[in-house]
Image (cartoon, helix red, strand yellow):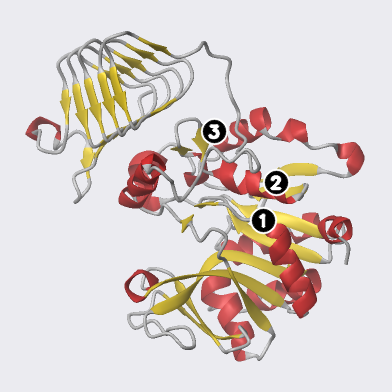
Amino acid sequence: MEKKDLLEKTTTLILAGGKGERLMSLTEHRAKPAVIFGGRYRIIDFVLSNCLNSGLSKIFVIVQYKFDSLVRHLDYGWKNIFSTERNEYLRVLPPQMKVGNNWYQGTADAVFQNLYSIRRDKPEYVLILSGDQIYKMNYLYLLYFHHYLASSVTIAATEVDIESAKRFGVLQVNENMEVIGFEEKPKKPKTIPNSDDKCLVSMGIYVFNSDVLAEELEQDMNDKNSHHDFGKNIIPRMIKQGKRIVAYTFHNPCYWRDVGTIDDYFKTSMDLFEENPPFNLYDENWPWRTFQTQRPPTKITLRSDIREAIISEGCVIDESEIVRSILSPGVKIGKKSQIIESIIMDDVIIEEKSIVFKAIIDKNNIIPANSMIESNNMMYNNTFTITPSGIVIVPRHF
């Protein structure tokens, strides 16, 4: 099949309704895919950029939890690049209760409740993605793999060590990469063939034949004991029934992060400072798109000391030290302040002679002069969240 035909016959669904409970300090007022990452991006920008760079232009975004800022971001930064004249679109699908009287009960239910939208273009393939992961992938290779192997479902998977596998859905495959077993967060994960220490985990990325998807979803909705989830119910049942499921191993490059916890989010952000970062924001051949407001250039005074930092547009840094930190647009740093291993989000003002160490400061906060934001400062214990690893989270201020 030609590239154009394959892309034309594919509809993409991005599941972006997650509550992100383990990121709650950052998701109390926003959906997880709307969380800021890398200074100027939202997490959902990375999967959308992957779609755009792969040539996919028929995209549904399924939302649910506190989706206002997410939808606004999509409206301002993404919808205007798709041409309706060429049958391109990016459409947001909030819960409408067109099937039953419930909100989305799980990932499978979210897709089932929107089958009417999917069927409108009569796609041959449906690509299902998560809107809250950080990675680079050309989905065209995944679609070709699925098409030529004539699979009912293809699951994108990546290799991890046994200890890491305990946090994910683990695939058991044979030597032909056919999926013959699946376990969610197993205590003793099964390793891949010819390896004693590597496991294959699901990335939550699926390609379904559209007729198979509709059949499986309808069967799942009739099961009163189902959680209506792809990983917990749909895939295990298909394996049990002997359906053809194939694993596509993601290698190029093998960097994929779910950023499911504050510690994961923080570590993934700090990865950006490596000399050759495993996730590259600066690849001109694979641009990362986002919505950008009109802001002036960043201003840095002569006596500032800045090392291993990502500084977004519109920042003002006045005689301060910035080390291994990310500053989002519009951040103001007062004189003689120190920002060390921290993430400072949009329009935060840190007044003079303040110290911020290993912290995440959410947007629009004003940190008073002479403040000390770090985990050993006992005065903040009842005010801010502090993770077991010592990361301080200053919640969003309105």
In three-dimensional space, the C-alpha distance between marks 2 and 3, rounded to whole angstroms, equals 24 Å
Instruction: From this view, report whether residue 200 is shown above or below residue 256.
Output: below
Instruction: From this view, report whether residue 241 is shown above or below residue 224.
Output: below
Residue assigned mark 3: 69
In three-dimensional space, the C-alpha distance between marks 1 and 2, rounded to whole angstroms, equals 7 Å
From the image, which quarter does the N terminus lie in?
bottom right
Q: Secondary structure at mark 2?
A: helix
Disc 1 + disc 2, Cβ < 8 Å? yes
Residue assigned mark 2: 53
Q: Along the polypeptide, which appears first: circle 2 or circle 3? A: 2
Q: Residue 364's spot in the image, x, y percent?
A: 38, 21
Residue assigned mark 1: 138
Q: Is residue 90 left or right of residue 297?
A: right
Q: Is residue 265 left or right of residue 43?
A: left
Question: Which callout, 1 or 3, points to the residue nearer the camera?
Answer: 1
Q: Is residue 236 left or right of residue 214?
A: left
In three-dimensional space, the C-alpha distance between marks 1 and 3, rounded to whole angstroms, equals 27 Å
Determine which of the numbered discs, if any, sits on residue 257 in the image.
none
Q: Is residue 293 left or right of residue 361?
A: right
Q: Residue furthest right?
A: 85
Between 15 and 343, the one nearer to me in the picture: 343
Whether residue 228 can be seen here? no
From the image, which quarter does the C terminus lie in?
top left
Amino acid type, mark 3? Ser
Amino acid type, mark 2? Asn
Q: Residue 110's spot in the image, x, y percent?
A: 63, 59
- Tell how many labels: 3
Amino acid type, mark 1? Asn
Between 150 and 1, the one nearer to me in the picture: 1
Disc 1 + disc 3, Cβ < 8 Å? no
Q: Secondary structure at mark 3?
A: helix
Question: Which callout, 2 or 3, points to the residue nearer the camera?
Answer: 2
